[in-house]
Image: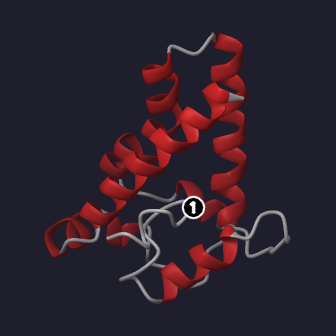
Amino acid sequence: AGTMLLHVLCTEVWFYAVHRTLHAPFFYKHIHAVHHRYKAPSCLESVYVHPVEYVLNSFAVCVVGPAISGAPMLVTFLWIGLVTFLQVHDHSGYWFPFLPRVLMHDYHHQQIRCCYGILGLLDGIF
């Protein structure tokens, strides 16, 4: 449980930093705008990103936590499965009380200057 919590915290910090940087005018125009073409996200859009963004965010959030924690292969595979599910769900448009992030993510696609994090922890600080 401690390892997964470390993965969540590492992912939150990594994703927030990269995602907020991708919203800077130069990076948004040349990289991140691809992902924001659609204001109402769909599941397929979770992987509809520029190749640079894929490496820095989509792929990186799967490996940053396990790399820092030295997680065993089984834990790493479980983490990658969870991250993949959540990435697709966040773009699905379906809201479940136990997975409220989809509302925050939909709002981010409509109002692109907010909700940069995954959990919103750093959005409240910065």
In which quadrant of the rendered image does the C terminus lie? bottom left
Above or below for 98 versus 38: above
- In the foreground, 41 or 2: 2
Using the rendered view, name the quadrant where residue 123 is placed: bottom left
In which quadrant of the rendered image does the N terminus lie? top right
Q: In the image, what residue type sits under mark 1?
A: Leu
Viewed as shown, does residue 37 lie left or right of 102?
A: left
Q: How many marks?
A: 1
Q: How is the image coloured?
A: secondary structure
> What is the x, y in percent for residue 71?
58, 16
Viewed as shown, does residue 66 lie left or right of 30?
A: right
Viewed as shown, does residue 95 lie left or right of 22?
A: right
Above or below for 76 versus 103: above
> What is the x, y in percent for residue 115?
47, 75
Farthest-out residue, bottom: 111
- In the foreground, 126 or 63: 126
Q: Residue at x 44, y 31 (%)?
A: 64
Farthest-out residue, left: 26
On the image, numbered disc 1 is attached to which residue?
119
> What is the x, y in percent for residue 77?
68, 23
> What is the x, y in percent for residue 122?
42, 63
Viewed as shown, does residue 71 lie left or right of 42?
A: left
Q: Secondary structure at mark 1?
A: loop
Using the rendered view, name the quadrant where residue 6 is placed: top right
Above or below for 87 versus 61: below
